[in-house]
Image (cartoon, rainbow, N blue to C red):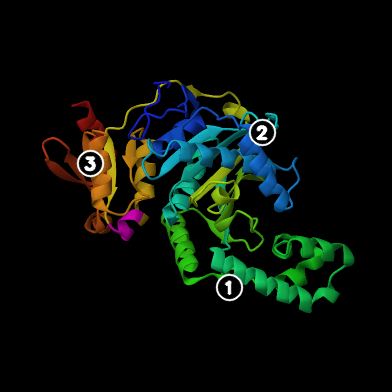
Protein backbone atom coordinates (compact mmCIF):
# COMPACT_ATOMS: atom_id res chain seq x y z
CA UNK A 1 0.00 0.00 0.00
CA UNK A 2 1.19 3.49 -0.73
CA UNK A 3 1.66 5.49 2.46
CA UNK A 4 1.46 9.15 1.50
CA UNK A 5 -2.29 9.37 2.04
CA UNK A 6 -3.42 8.20 5.49
CA UNK A 7 -6.42 5.87 5.27
CA UNK A 8 -9.59 6.66 7.23
CA UNK A 9 -10.16 2.91 7.52
CA UNK A 10 -9.33 1.26 10.80
CA UNK A 11 -7.30 -1.61 9.31
CA UNK A 12 -4.90 -1.96 6.44
CA UNK A 13 -6.49 -2.77 3.10
CA UNK A 14 -5.10 -5.56 0.97
CA UNK A 15 -6.51 -5.12 -2.51
CA UNK A 16 -7.32 -1.40 -2.67
CA UNK A 17 -4.32 0.88 -3.14
CA UNK A 18 -4.59 4.37 -1.72
CA UNK A 19 -3.50 7.09 -4.12
CA UNK A 20 0.11 8.23 -3.76
CA UNK A 21 -0.88 11.73 -4.88
CA UNK A 22 -4.11 13.49 -5.75
CA UNK A 23 -5.25 16.47 -7.74
CA UNK A 24 -7.27 19.27 -6.14
CA UNK A 25 -10.65 17.46 -6.42
CA UNK A 26 -9.20 14.51 -4.51
CA UNK A 27 -7.91 16.82 -1.78
CA UNK A 28 -11.34 18.40 -1.36
CA UNK A 29 -12.96 14.95 -1.17
CA UNK A 30 -10.38 13.87 1.41
CA UNK A 31 -11.37 16.77 3.67
CA UNK A 32 -14.91 15.42 3.60
CA UNK A 33 -13.80 11.94 4.67
CA UNK A 34 -13.37 10.22 1.28
CA UNK A 35 -10.42 7.89 0.70
CA UNK A 36 -8.63 8.79 -2.55
CA UNK A 37 -7.82 5.41 -4.11
CA UNK A 38 -5.84 4.42 -7.15
CA UNK A 39 -8.28 3.88 -10.01
CA UNK A 40 -9.29 0.19 -9.80
CA UNK A 41 -9.18 -2.15 -12.78
CA UNK A 42 -12.35 -3.90 -13.88
CA UNK A 43 -11.87 -7.65 -14.16
CA UNK A 44 -13.56 -9.87 -16.73
CA UNK A 45 -16.16 -11.26 -14.33
CA UNK A 46 -17.36 -7.88 -13.08
CA UNK A 47 -17.43 -6.55 -16.63
CA UNK A 48 -19.53 -9.50 -17.79
CA UNK A 49 -21.98 -9.21 -14.89
CA UNK A 50 -22.40 -5.46 -15.34
CA UNK A 51 -22.94 -5.79 -19.09
CA UNK A 52 -25.67 -8.32 -18.34
CA UNK A 53 -27.43 -5.82 -16.08
CA UNK A 54 -27.00 -3.10 -18.72
CA UNK A 55 -28.52 -5.33 -21.39
CA UNK A 56 -31.53 -6.21 -19.26
CA UNK A 57 -31.99 -2.47 -18.60
CA UNK A 58 -31.91 -1.74 -22.33
CA UNK A 59 -28.60 0.13 -22.17
CA UNK A 60 -26.23 -0.19 -25.12
CA UNK A 61 -22.59 -1.15 -24.45
CA UNK A 62 -21.24 2.15 -25.73
CA UNK A 63 -23.38 4.33 -23.46
CA UNK A 64 -21.99 6.07 -20.40
CA UNK A 65 -24.43 4.20 -18.16
CA UNK A 66 -22.99 0.86 -19.27
CA UNK A 67 -19.43 1.93 -18.46
CA UNK A 68 -20.57 3.33 -15.14
CA UNK A 69 -22.27 0.06 -14.18
CA UNK A 70 -18.97 -1.77 -14.67
CA UNK A 71 -17.24 0.70 -12.36
CA UNK A 72 -19.87 0.34 -9.66
CA UNK A 73 -19.78 -3.44 -9.96
CA UNK A 74 -16.02 -3.35 -9.35
CA UNK A 75 -16.40 -1.11 -6.27
CA UNK A 76 -19.08 -3.35 -4.78
CA UNK A 77 -16.97 -6.45 -5.35
CA UNK A 78 -13.92 -4.82 -3.77
CA UNK A 79 -16.03 -3.80 -0.79
CA UNK A 80 -17.20 -7.39 -0.28
CA UNK A 81 -13.66 -8.76 -0.65
CA UNK A 82 -12.35 -6.29 1.95
CA UNK A 83 -15.24 -6.31 4.44
CA UNK A 84 -13.02 -7.66 7.21
CA UNK A 85 -10.82 -4.58 6.83
CA UNK A 86 -13.53 -1.97 6.39
CA UNK A 87 -15.63 -0.18 8.94
CA UNK A 88 -19.34 -0.48 8.19
CA UNK A 89 -19.42 2.49 5.80
CA UNK A 90 -16.72 3.52 3.31
CA UNK A 91 -16.16 6.60 1.17
CA UNK A 92 -14.23 6.32 -2.10
CA UNK A 93 -12.83 9.00 -4.41
CA UNK A 94 -11.22 7.88 -7.67
CA UNK A 95 -10.37 9.26 -11.10
CA UNK A 96 -12.16 7.86 -14.14
CA UNK A 97 -12.43 5.91 -16.34
CA UNK A 98 -11.45 2.64 -14.74
CA UNK A 99 -9.03 0.45 -16.60
CA UNK A 100 -10.68 -2.52 -18.31
CA UNK A 101 -13.97 -0.71 -18.95
CA UNK A 102 -13.22 -0.34 -22.67
CA UNK A 103 -13.67 3.39 -22.37
CA UNK A 104 -10.90 5.82 -23.28
CA UNK A 105 -9.92 8.86 -21.28
CA UNK A 106 -11.37 11.94 -22.97
CA UNK A 107 -10.53 15.62 -22.84
CA UNK A 108 -12.64 16.16 -19.71
CA UNK A 109 -11.42 15.53 -16.18
CA UNK A 110 -13.63 12.88 -14.60
CA UNK A 111 -13.89 11.53 -11.09
CA UNK A 112 -16.24 9.42 -9.02
CA UNK A 113 -17.42 9.62 -5.41
CA UNK A 114 -19.19 6.66 -3.82
CA UNK A 115 -20.50 5.90 -0.33
CA UNK A 116 -20.88 2.16 0.18
CA UNK A 117 -22.54 0.45 3.13
CA UNK A 118 -24.86 3.25 4.24
CA UNK A 119 -28.56 3.56 3.48
CA UNK A 120 -28.88 6.85 5.37
CA UNK A 121 -29.92 10.11 3.76
CA UNK A 122 -26.75 11.82 4.93
CA UNK A 123 -24.80 9.72 2.41
CA UNK A 124 -26.50 11.56 -0.48
CA UNK A 125 -25.97 14.84 1.36
CA UNK A 126 -22.25 14.16 1.76
CA UNK A 127 -21.89 13.41 -1.94
CA UNK A 128 -23.75 16.55 -2.98
CA UNK A 129 -21.88 18.80 -0.52
CA UNK A 130 -18.50 17.36 -1.56
CA UNK A 131 -19.30 17.65 -5.27
CA UNK A 132 -20.39 21.25 -4.77
CA UNK A 133 -17.14 22.07 -2.96
CA UNK A 134 -15.05 20.40 -5.70
CA UNK A 135 -16.80 22.32 -8.48
CA UNK A 136 -16.56 25.60 -6.59
CA UNK A 137 -12.80 25.10 -6.28
CA UNK A 138 -12.71 24.49 -10.04
CA UNK A 139 -14.20 27.93 -10.68
CA UNK A 140 -17.85 27.10 -11.27
CA UNK A 141 -20.49 29.46 -9.93
CA UNK A 142 -24.23 29.38 -9.25
CA UNK A 143 -24.15 25.65 -8.64
CA UNK A 144 -27.57 24.02 -8.50
CA UNK A 145 -28.95 20.56 -7.84
CA UNK A 146 -31.80 18.89 -9.72
CA UNK A 147 -33.17 16.02 -7.66
CA UNK A 148 -35.88 13.38 -7.59
CA UNK A 149 -36.74 10.13 -5.84
CA UNK A 150 -38.28 6.89 -7.09
CA UNK A 151 -38.19 5.32 -3.63
CA UNK A 152 -37.70 1.73 -2.53
CA UNK A 153 -38.96 -1.49 -4.12
CA UNK A 154 -42.49 -0.92 -2.86
CA UNK A 155 -42.51 2.59 -4.33
CA UNK A 156 -41.02 1.45 -7.64
CA UNK A 157 -43.61 -1.32 -8.02
CA UNK A 158 -46.45 1.08 -7.35
CA UNK A 159 -45.05 3.63 -9.80
CA UNK A 160 -44.65 0.99 -12.49
CA UNK A 161 -48.24 -0.25 -12.04
CA UNK A 162 -49.66 3.27 -12.23
CA UNK A 163 -47.56 4.15 -15.30
CA UNK A 164 -48.68 0.99 -17.12
CA UNK A 165 -52.33 1.77 -16.36
CA UNK A 166 -51.87 5.36 -17.53
CA UNK A 167 -50.11 4.24 -20.73
CA UNK A 168 -52.92 1.85 -21.60
CA UNK A 169 -55.59 4.49 -21.06
CA UNK A 170 -53.83 7.09 -23.22
CA UNK A 171 -52.04 4.97 -25.82
CA UNK A 172 -54.02 6.52 -28.69
CA UNK A 173 -52.51 9.92 -27.86
CA UNK A 174 -48.98 8.65 -28.60
CA UNK A 175 -47.27 8.71 -31.99
CA UNK A 176 -46.37 5.18 -33.09
CA UNK A 177 -42.55 5.49 -32.62
CA UNK A 178 -43.02 6.25 -28.91
CA UNK A 179 -45.36 3.36 -28.24
CA UNK A 180 -42.61 0.80 -28.69
CA UNK A 181 -40.13 2.76 -26.56
CA UNK A 182 -42.59 3.13 -23.69
CA UNK A 183 -43.64 -0.49 -23.95
CA UNK A 184 -39.99 -1.57 -23.65
CA UNK A 185 -39.33 0.61 -20.60
CA UNK A 186 -42.39 2.23 -19.05
CA UNK A 187 -40.22 4.70 -17.12
CA UNK A 188 -39.31 6.37 -20.44
CA UNK A 189 -42.64 8.20 -20.09
CA UNK A 190 -41.07 10.19 -17.27
CA UNK A 191 -37.59 10.56 -18.76
CA UNK A 192 -38.64 11.99 -22.11
CA UNK A 193 -38.20 15.74 -22.61
CA UNK A 194 -39.71 15.86 -26.10
CA UNK A 195 -41.91 18.98 -26.13
CA UNK A 196 -44.37 17.21 -28.43
CA UNK A 197 -45.21 14.84 -25.58
CA UNK A 198 -45.25 17.45 -22.83
CA UNK A 199 -48.97 17.18 -22.09
CA UNK A 200 -48.76 13.37 -22.09
CA UNK A 201 -45.81 13.31 -19.67
CA UNK A 202 -47.24 15.98 -17.35
CA UNK A 203 -50.42 13.97 -16.96
CA UNK A 204 -48.55 10.77 -16.03
CA UNK A 205 -48.18 9.56 -12.42
CA UNK A 206 -45.12 11.17 -10.79
CA UNK A 207 -42.55 9.31 -8.63
CA UNK A 208 -43.00 11.49 -5.54
CA UNK A 209 -46.72 10.65 -5.44
CA UNK A 210 -46.02 6.90 -5.19
CA UNK A 211 -43.34 6.97 -2.48
CA UNK A 212 -43.78 4.73 0.55
CA UNK A 213 -43.75 6.39 3.97
CA UNK A 214 -40.15 5.27 4.54
CA UNK A 215 -38.99 6.57 1.16
CA UNK A 216 -40.82 9.86 1.63
CA UNK A 217 -39.08 10.34 4.99
CA UNK A 218 -35.69 9.50 3.41
CA UNK A 219 -36.16 12.02 0.61
CA UNK A 220 -37.38 14.68 3.03
CA UNK A 221 -34.18 14.28 5.03
CA UNK A 222 -32.00 14.56 1.91
CA UNK A 223 -33.70 17.85 1.05
CA UNK A 224 -33.29 19.12 4.62
CA UNK A 225 -29.54 18.45 4.45
CA UNK A 226 -29.27 20.30 1.13
CA UNK A 227 -31.22 23.25 2.53
CA UNK A 228 -29.04 23.38 5.66
CA UNK A 229 -25.99 23.69 3.39
CA UNK A 230 -27.61 26.51 1.43
CA UNK A 231 -27.38 24.72 -1.93
CA UNK A 232 -30.13 25.72 -4.40
CA UNK A 233 -32.16 22.78 -5.73
CA UNK A 234 -35.20 21.97 -7.83
CA UNK A 235 -37.35 18.83 -8.04
CA UNK A 236 -36.98 17.35 -11.54
CA UNK A 237 -39.58 14.68 -12.37
CA UNK A 238 -37.58 13.65 -15.47
CA UNK A 239 -34.75 12.26 -13.30
CA UNK A 240 -35.60 8.57 -13.14
CA UNK A 241 -32.97 5.85 -12.99
CA UNK A 242 -33.24 2.30 -14.27
CA UNK A 243 -35.63 0.09 -12.30
CA UNK A 244 -33.06 -2.70 -12.69
CA UNK A 245 -30.60 -1.18 -10.21
CA UNK A 246 -31.44 2.43 -9.23
CA UNK A 247 -33.53 3.32 -6.19
CA UNK A 248 -34.35 6.20 -3.88
CA UNK A 249 -32.54 9.43 -4.80
CA UNK A 250 -31.45 10.50 -8.29
CA UNK A 251 -29.77 13.85 -8.83
CA UNK A 252 -27.74 15.96 -11.23
CA UNK A 253 -25.55 18.99 -10.62
CA UNK A 254 -24.94 22.01 -12.85
CA UNK A 255 -22.93 25.21 -12.66
CA UNK A 256 -21.94 28.29 -14.62
CA UNK A 257 -18.61 29.33 -16.09
CA UNK A 258 -18.00 32.18 -18.53
CA UNK A 259 -21.75 32.76 -18.75
CA UNK A 260 -22.57 29.19 -19.79
CA UNK A 261 -24.60 26.75 -17.70
CA UNK A 262 -23.23 23.22 -17.86
CA UNK A 263 -24.35 19.86 -16.50
CA UNK A 264 -21.34 18.71 -14.50
CA UNK A 265 -22.41 15.51 -12.81
CA UNK A 266 -25.10 12.99 -12.01
CA UNK A 267 -25.67 10.53 -9.21
CA UNK A 268 -28.08 7.95 -7.85
CA UNK A 269 -28.54 5.22 -5.29
CA UNK A 270 -27.83 1.73 -6.54
CA UNK A 271 -28.88 -0.42 -3.56
CA UNK A 272 -30.22 -3.19 -5.83
CA UNK A 273 -27.11 -3.60 -8.00
CA UNK A 274 -25.12 -5.90 -5.70
CA UNK A 275 -27.55 -8.81 -6.06
CA UNK A 276 -27.86 -8.18 -9.80
CA UNK A 277 -24.11 -8.78 -10.21
CA UNK A 278 -24.18 -12.01 -8.21
CA UNK A 279 -23.29 -10.88 -4.69
CA UNK A 280 -25.10 -12.67 -1.88
CA UNK A 281 -26.37 -9.63 -0.02
CA UNK A 282 -27.86 -6.27 -0.83
CA UNK A 283 -25.34 -3.50 -0.24
CA UNK A 284 -26.68 0.04 0.11
CA UNK A 285 -24.63 2.41 -2.03
CA UNK A 286 -24.84 5.81 -3.67
CA UNK A 287 -22.44 7.51 -6.07
CA UNK A 288 -21.87 10.53 -8.24
CA UNK A 289 -19.80 11.04 -11.40
CA UNK A 290 -18.36 14.49 -12.10
CA UNK A 291 -16.99 15.58 -15.47
CA UNK A 292 -15.81 18.96 -16.75
CA UNK A 293 -13.38 20.56 -19.14
CA UNK A 294 -10.68 22.50 -17.38
CA UNK A 295 -10.12 26.09 -18.40
CA UNK A 296 -8.13 29.17 -17.39
CA UNK A 297 -6.14 28.89 -14.18
CA UNK A 298 -7.68 25.46 -13.55
CA UNK A 299 -6.37 24.01 -16.82
CA UNK A 300 -3.19 22.78 -15.17
CA UNK A 301 -3.72 20.19 -12.49
CA UNK A 302 -2.57 21.02 -8.97
CA UNK A 303 -1.09 17.82 -7.56
CA UNK A 304 -1.02 17.27 -3.81
CA UNK A 305 1.60 14.70 -2.88
CA UNK A 306 1.00 14.51 0.85
CA UNK A 307 -2.24 14.95 2.73
CA UNK A 308 -2.36 15.58 6.48
CA UNK A 309 -3.32 13.10 9.15
CA UNK A 310 -6.57 14.01 10.97
CA UNK A 311 -6.10 15.46 14.45
CA UNK A 312 -9.81 15.96 15.05
CA UNK A 313 -12.80 13.62 15.06
CA UNK A 314 -16.22 15.22 14.63
CA UNK A 315 -19.01 13.61 16.68
CA UNK A 316 -22.64 14.65 16.23
CA UNK A 317 -25.44 13.96 18.68
CA UNK A 318 -28.98 14.00 17.36
CA UNK A 319 -30.62 14.76 14.04
CA UNK A 320 -30.66 18.54 14.35
CA UNK A 321 -26.93 18.54 15.03
CA UNK A 322 -26.34 16.24 12.05
CA UNK A 323 -28.26 18.65 9.81
CA UNK A 324 -25.87 21.49 10.67
CA UNK A 325 -22.72 19.33 10.54
CA UNK A 326 -21.89 19.68 6.84
CA UNK A 327 -21.59 23.50 6.94
CA UNK A 328 -19.24 23.15 9.96
CA UNK A 329 -17.03 20.66 8.09
CA UNK A 330 -17.01 22.92 5.02
CA UNK A 331 -15.90 25.88 7.16
CA UNK A 332 -13.03 23.80 8.54
CA UNK A 333 -12.07 22.53 5.06
CA UNK A 334 -11.71 26.06 3.80
CA UNK A 335 -9.36 26.70 6.71
CA UNK A 336 -7.35 23.57 5.81
CA UNK A 337 -8.38 21.77 9.01
CA UNK A 338 -8.92 18.05 8.44
CA UNK A 339 -11.54 16.25 10.52
CA UNK A 340 -12.64 12.65 10.48
CA UNK A 341 -16.32 12.04 11.11
CA UNK A 342 -19.01 9.41 11.57
CA UNK A 343 -21.94 11.19 9.98
CA UNK A 344 -23.34 7.92 8.64
CA UNK A 345 -23.52 6.64 12.24
CA UNK A 346 -26.11 7.73 14.79
CA UNK A 347 -24.88 6.50 18.17
CA UNK A 348 -22.26 8.32 20.22
CA UNK A 349 -20.61 5.02 21.21
CA UNK A 350 -19.92 4.03 17.59
CA UNK A 351 -18.40 7.40 16.73
CA UNK A 352 -16.35 7.57 19.95
CA UNK A 353 -15.08 4.02 19.38
CA UNK A 354 -13.79 4.93 15.91
CA UNK A 355 -12.09 8.03 17.30
CA UNK A 356 -10.43 5.92 19.99
CA UNK A 357 -9.32 3.20 17.56
CA UNK A 358 -7.77 5.76 15.22
CA UNK A 359 -6.12 7.53 18.20
CA UNK A 360 -7.41 10.94 17.13
CA UNK A 361 -6.02 13.54 19.60
CA UNK A 362 -9.14 15.73 19.81
CA UNK A 363 -12.90 15.26 19.68
CA UNK A 364 -15.26 17.88 18.29
CA UNK A 365 -18.62 17.19 19.94
CA UNK A 366 -21.64 18.78 18.32
CA UNK A 367 -24.94 18.10 20.07
CA UNK A 368 -28.42 19.59 20.19
CA UNK A 369 -27.37 22.34 22.62
CA UNK A 370 -24.33 23.25 20.51
CA UNK A 371 -26.42 23.30 17.32
CA UNK A 372 -28.77 25.84 18.89
CA UNK A 373 -25.97 27.98 20.33
CA UNK A 374 -23.67 27.71 17.26
CA UNK A 375 -20.83 26.28 19.31
CA UNK A 376 -18.70 23.11 19.32
CA UNK A 377 -17.32 21.25 22.34
CA UNK A 378 -13.57 20.62 21.83
CA UNK A 379 -12.24 17.78 24.01
CA UNK A 380 -8.67 16.57 24.49
CA UNK A 381 -8.80 12.77 24.11
CA UNK A 382 -6.04 12.20 26.68
CA UNK A 383 -6.72 14.73 29.42
CA UNK A 384 -10.53 14.95 28.87
CA UNK A 385 -10.21 18.72 29.25
CA UNK A 386 -12.76 20.47 27.09
CA UNK A 387 -13.69 23.94 25.86
CA UNK A 388 -16.87 25.31 24.34
CA UNK A 389 -15.90 27.24 21.22
CA UNK A 390 -18.10 29.47 19.04
CA UNK A 391 -18.31 28.71 15.31
CA UNK A 392 -16.62 31.98 14.40
CA UNK A 393 -13.58 31.16 16.56
CA UNK A 394 -13.38 27.43 15.80
CA UNK A 395 -10.79 27.43 12.96
CA UNK A 396 -8.41 29.71 14.91
CA UNK A 397 -8.84 27.67 18.09
CA UNK A 398 -8.20 24.33 16.38
CA UNK A 399 -5.11 25.63 14.63
CA UNK A 400 -3.70 26.90 17.90
CA UNK A 401 -4.17 23.64 19.84
CA UNK A 402 -2.96 21.48 16.96
CA UNK A 403 0.39 23.33 17.05
CA UNK A 404 0.75 23.00 20.81
Numbered circle sitting on residue 101: 2
Q: Earlier in the sequence, mark 3 or mark 2?
A: 2
Quarter the C terminus occupies: top left
Left or right: 277, with 171 as reference point: left
Q: Position of residue 355 (x, y in %)?
A: 25, 39
The residue stretch that appears in magenta: 318-322
Q: Position of residue 389 (x, y in %)?
A: 21, 45
Viewer-nearest residue: 296 or 9: 9
Q: Secondary structure at mark 3?
A: strand
Is residue 72 part of the magenta span, yes or no? no
Q: Position of residue 106 (x, y in %)?
A: 69, 30
Query: Would you place residue 92 above or below residue 215 in this image?
Result: above
Is residue 319 part of the magenta span, yes or no? yes
Viewer-nearest residue: 370 or 217: 217
Numbered circle sitting on residue 363: 3
Quarter the N terminus occupies: top left
User: Would you identify the image quadrant in which residue 400 lies?
Assistant: top left
Q: Earlier in the sequence, mark 1 or mark 2?
A: 2
Q: Position of residue 260 (x, y in %)?
A: 67, 44
The single residue placed furthest to the right in the displayed view is 176
Q: Secondary structure at mark 2?
A: loop
User: Would you identify the image quadrant in which residue 189 lies?
Assistant: bottom right
The Cα–Cα distance between marks 1 and 2, rounded to whole angstroms, is 37 Å
**What's the residue at 17%, 41% (across, down)?**
379
The Cα–Cα distance between marks 3 and 2, rounded to whole angstroms, is 42 Å
**Are there few (<14), some (14-19), or many (20+) residues within 10 Å of tag 2?**
many
Residue where numbered disc 1 is placed:
209
**Are there few (<14), some (14-19), or many (20+) residues within 10 Å of tag 3?**
many
Amino acid sequence: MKKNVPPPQEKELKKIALASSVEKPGEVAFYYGFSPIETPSINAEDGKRARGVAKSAGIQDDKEEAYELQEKARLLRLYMEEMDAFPQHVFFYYEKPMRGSGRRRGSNFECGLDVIGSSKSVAEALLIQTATAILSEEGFENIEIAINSVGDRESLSRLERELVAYYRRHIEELPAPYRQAFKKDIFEILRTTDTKLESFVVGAPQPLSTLSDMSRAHFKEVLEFIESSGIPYTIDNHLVGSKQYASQTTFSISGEREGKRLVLGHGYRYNHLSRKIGLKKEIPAVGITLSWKRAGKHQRATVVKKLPKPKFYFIHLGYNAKLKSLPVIETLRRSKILVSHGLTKDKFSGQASTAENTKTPYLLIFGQKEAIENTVLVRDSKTRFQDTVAFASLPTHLKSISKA
